[in-house]
């Protein structure tokens, strides 16, 4: 299957004509003010950086043991041998990878899973492939699997399955459940799923073509209608005194609910991973309100003024203040950073503030979190559980493996590397970013290599 795109980079799923432009008093101005304040104290901070860098160099050298699960360990030397063995093997076979064949196998795996779900658990939120049964997470179900997988069904051009999913969304999906659901998960999987379906079905009408989607047909706007119904309910989660959303909400009442754990704080990644969806819906509907609610969240986060663009992983919805000092790119931190660069790309480079925030964060990551293992020479992203001035923990969540792709996206803007290299702005910085991305990807690969199952551990301590 080939997707022919018009002319890059306009072909990216981005838009230029924003429904709402950030005016004075909004985030851009706010950040400028903060930057001026920051410059005034930068000399003092310079000394602190010196200490931090010194510590990173002399005190932060990573351990030589990679451990996984409870008590499972592998020496760095052994891991190195494994990696080298694998690379040698690959060089020996010397054959070019048959991507078409691999793609078919991925599609086969998807079809097997999907058809099992359809047969034994259709419409349920959870599927138990061994017990061959399904279960809902809230009464009536949310269609988690169907809506979340819809874009994959479309990209794989599985037309009859898309038709069936669409029928279910039309006749069975409802969002008036009187139960708490997670604000972030509901946004990225449900709202994101519906918006992706709208985007793909209108931009690539030859993919999984179904008549209901066609312009002028009675069901044409199904995905947008469902998305708008859901988004209007989700807006209740943003009704906190700071504008930072509550971790959960009741969709029927559209009322936010404090997290039952973590001292009631929301997670920073969750609060910072709603923007693409709501902004795209603002664009589609012309409703600036969706835009303003999510942009406000970034303004509050940025207003807390953290060092080098790195933020603690918890934030209170009522005060907008961070809770604690724990800084990491793994759980509860990860996609805040991802959405910075993606927000920049989403509005076709028209909001340089997000590029600046992303680049500041990436420099912060290099300065405070990147370190190297001794024996296997792997580049890792560690954690600062007690803030940037305290020790670096050589722990890396599997979730951090989003980072190499995001760094590459930031460097290339989504273009193939060969094409991106020809752009006027391409230079040493972009090459250095691509190198870091490759090194981190290699580390992620190594964590898969290190287990008997070939599945990476959720958390690795180096
Ligand atoms: C997708 O499948 C349909 C048949 O269901 C076919 O007509 C169409 O060309 C395919 N699209 C692509 C992009 O391969
Ligand atoms: C949602 O709330 C309305 C009243 O506002 C109620 O009539 C309805 O039964 C509720 N839906 C569910 C699924 O509880």
Image (cartoon, grey):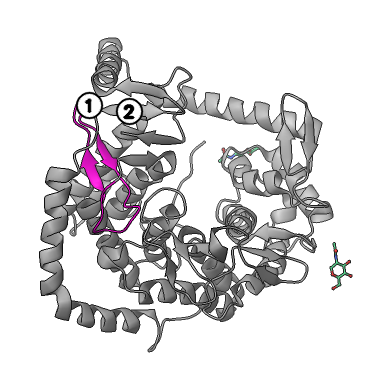
Is residue 390 rendered magenta in the image?
yes
> Is residue 168 placed above or below 92 in the rendered structure?
below
- Residues at discs 1 and 2 in contact (Cβ within 8 Å): yes
Rendered residue at 36%/52% (across/down): 328
The single residue placed furthest to the bottom in the displayed view is 24
- The span shown in magenta is 369-392
Rendered residue at 41%/48% (across/down): 330
Residue 71: x and y in percent read: 43, 24
Which residue position holds label 1?
Answer: 376
> Is residue 343 placed above or below 404 in the rendered structure?
below
Which residue position holds label 2?
Answer: 66
Q: Which mark is residue 352?
A: none
- Side of 302 where 232 appears, left or right: right
Location of residue 378 by image quarter:
top left
- Label count reads 2
Location of residue 226 by image quarter:
bottom right
Quadrant of picture, ligand 1 = top right
Mark 2 secondary-structure assignment? strand
Is residue 265 rendered magenta in the image?
no
Residue 386: x and y in percent read: 33, 56
Which one is in front, 170 or 50?
50
Residue 123: x and y in percent read: 79, 43
Label 2 crowd (10 A; few <14 / some 14-19 / many >=20) = many
Rendered residue at 47%/54% (across/down): 332
Distance from mark 2 CB to nearest ligand 1 atom below 8 Å = no
Rendered residue at 45%/22% (across/down): 454
Look at the image and tell me whether residue 243 can be seen: yes
Secondary structure, magenta segment, majority class: loop
- Side of 112 where 423 appears, left or right: left
């Amino acid at each position: 299957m080939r997707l022919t795109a018009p002319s890059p980079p306009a072909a990216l799923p981005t838009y230029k004509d924003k429904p709402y432009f950030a005016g004075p008093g909004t985030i851009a101005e706010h950040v400028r003010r903060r930057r001026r304040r920051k410059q005034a104290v930068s000399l003092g901070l310079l000394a602190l950086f010196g200490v931090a860098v010194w510590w990173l160099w002399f005190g932060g050298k990573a351990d030589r043991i990679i451990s996984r699960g409870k008590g499972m360990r592998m020496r760095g030397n052994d891991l190195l041998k494994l990696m080298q063995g694998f690379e040698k093997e690959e060089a020996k076979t010397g054959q070019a990878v048959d991507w078409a064949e691999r793609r078919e196998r991925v599609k086969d795996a998807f079809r097997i899973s999907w058809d099992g779900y359809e047969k034994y658990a259709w419409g349920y939120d959870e599927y138990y492939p061994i017990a061959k049964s399904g279960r809902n997470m809230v009464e009536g179900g949310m269609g988690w699997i169907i809506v979340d997988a819809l874009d994959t069904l479309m990209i794989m051009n599985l037309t009859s399955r898309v038709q069936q999913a669409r029928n279910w969304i039309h006749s069975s999906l409802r969002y008036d459940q009187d139960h708490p659901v997670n604000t972030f998960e509901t946004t990225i999987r449900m709202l994101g799923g519906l918006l992706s379906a709208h985007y793909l079905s209108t931009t690539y009408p030859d993919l999984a073509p179904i008549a209901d989607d066609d312009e002028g047909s009675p069901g044409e706007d199904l995905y947008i209608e469902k998305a708008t119904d859901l988004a209007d309910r989700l807006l209740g989660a943003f009704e906190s005194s700071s504008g930072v959303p509550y971790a959960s909400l009741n969709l029927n009442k559209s009322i936010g609910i404090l997290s039952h754990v973590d001292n009631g704080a929301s997670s920073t990644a969750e609060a910072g991973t709603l923007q693409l969806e709501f902004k795209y819906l603002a664009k589609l509907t012309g409703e600036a309100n969706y835009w303003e609610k999510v942009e406000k969240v970034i303004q509050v986060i940025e207003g807390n003024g953290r060092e080098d663009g790195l933020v603690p992983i918890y934030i209170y919805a009522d005060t907008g203040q961070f809770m604690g000092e724990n800084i990491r790119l793994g759980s509860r931190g990860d996609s805040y950073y991802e959405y910075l660069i993606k927000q920049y790309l989403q509005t076709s480079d028209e909001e340089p503030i997000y590029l600046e925030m992303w680049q500041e964060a990436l420099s912060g990551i290099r300065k405070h979190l990147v370190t190297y293992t001794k024996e296997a020479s792997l580049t890792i992203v560690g954690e600062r559980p007690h803030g940037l001035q305290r020790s670096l923990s050589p722990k890396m969540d599997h979730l951090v493996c989003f980072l190499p792709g995001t760094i590459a996206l930031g460097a290339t803007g989504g273009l193939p590397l060969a094409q991106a290299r020809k752009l006027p702005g391409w230079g040493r910085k972009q090459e250095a970013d691509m190198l870091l991305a490759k090194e981190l990807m290699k580390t992620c690969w190594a964590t898969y290599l290190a287990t008997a199952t070939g599945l990476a551990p959720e958390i690795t301590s180096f």
